[in-house]
Image (tube, grey):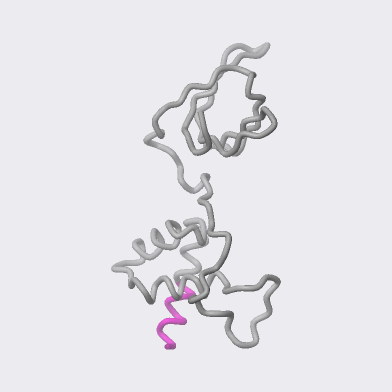
Amino acid sequence: MQVDDFVRWTGSDEEGEFSHVGQVYYIKNEMVALRTQHGVIHVPAEDGAFKVVDKPKDWNLSVVKTKRPTTASPNLPKTRKGQKRKKNGPTKIDLIVELLRKDPPSSRKDAIEKIVAAGISTPAGASTFYNTAKKLLKDD
């Protein structure tokens, strides 16, 4: 079992046996964190049995957060003039506008999938970001 594997954790308590399927988020200090359909579960590594399984067909990707890049690419645009920032680097909308400029989407659905795949936003946020980016691209 390692990080990003899908596992079935089986255990028991006073109410009986149970099992959860999830993706291993991290293993640290003999604790295993599993991302499940209902959130993250922290389990002692020796508590119950872990078995590596295939990714569930009905895995809800909106619950599973994708890993975001830790550093921005130096060739991406900086923030727009007059925009206040708490962090250095481009805003999410700047990243999305640049992404859509480089590879124009064929549809709204395609654009949202690209934004989510890039790890910039969740599907719900990507929809809002896409509408804003579309207006900014129209102004260019």
Judge whether 65 appears above or below 7 on screen.
Answer: below
Residue 66 locus on image (x, y percent)? 51, 51
Residue interval drawn in magenta = 131-140
Question: Closest to the observer: 84 or 136?
Answer: 84
Magenta span: helix, strand or loop, mainly? helix
Question: Closest to the observer: 54 or 124?
Answer: 54
Image point (52%, 60%), residue name: 121
**Membership of 134 in magenta stretch:** yes
Whether residue 80 sits left or right of residue 131 in the image: it is: right
Whether residue 90 sits left or right of residue 52 in the image: it is: right
Q: Quadrant of residue 59?
A: top left
Q: Which residue is situated farthest in the front direction here? A: 74
Image point (45%, 80%), residue name: 135
Judge whether 76 appears above or below 46 on screen.
Answer: below
Image point (62%, 31%), residue name: 32
Judge whether 91 appears above or below 39 on screen.
Answer: below
